Amino acid sequence: VASCGTRYTQGVMGFSIWLLSSKVGPAEICRRVEAFLVDFRKKVAEEIPDEDIERHVASLAAHKLEPDRTMISVQEGIWGELQDRKRVFDRSLAEAVALAGVTRADVLKVLDVHFARAAPERRLMIVASIGGKAKAKKAE
């Protein structure tokens, strides 16, 4: 099982990768995540066509501009702005406008500054939960 995504917790923007395995331990999972990040950067830099990047950016912007479907989602958005003391009630519009200018170079810069193994702004926390019946293996 694998998943990843962004999160915003207590005023801190983050990116999480969640992995679950009954076959390999935490050290191997970490090695695979590092390999994935290297491969992902290579794909963004060399393999993904410009048109695909432009379509993805446009899709993200369009998603930001989707109207709230329920009153509870409107309330949650407004309440979140009040709780964070930001009071930016047109955040979705502002984010959609900002997305319109995102380029391949911008994505590569974020990967190089925040995600690469030696990235200057990289902050990493690893949490491993190991079941009681798991066989302990010494990390190599």
Image (cartoon, rainbow, N blue to C red):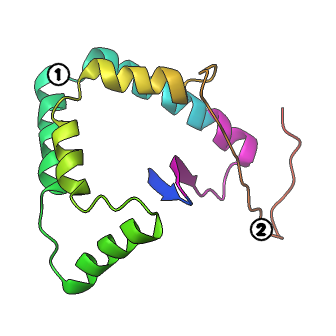
Disc 1, SS: loop
Q: Which residue is mark 1?
A: 49
Q: Which residue is mark 2?
A: 131
**Does residue 108 appear anywhere in the picture?**
yes
Query: Amino acid type of disc 2?
Result: Gly
Picture disc at residue 130: none
Up/down of 87 relative to 114, above or below: below
Up/down of 120 relative to 23, above or below: above
> Tag 2: Cα neighbours inside 10 Å, few (<14), some, or many (≥20)?
few
Query: At 45% across and 26% down in the image, what residue appears?
Result: 111
User: In the rendering, at what x and y percent does residue 17 appear?
Assistant: 53, 49
Query: At 53% across and 50% down in the image, what residue appears?
Result: 16
Query: At 73% across and 47% down in the image, what residue appears?
Result: 26
User: In the rendering, at what x and y percent does residue 80 appear?
Assistant: 40, 70
Give the side of residue 109 with respect to residue 101, left or right: right
> How many numbered marks appear?
2
Q: Please provide the residue range marked out in magenta.
A: 11-31
Residue 19 on the magenta span:
yes
**Does residue 2 appear anywhere in the picture?**
no
Nearer to the camera, 57 or 134? 57
Give the side of residue 40 with respect to residue 72, left or right: right
Give the side of residue 75 with respect to residue 119, left or right: left
Residue 48 on the magenta span:
no
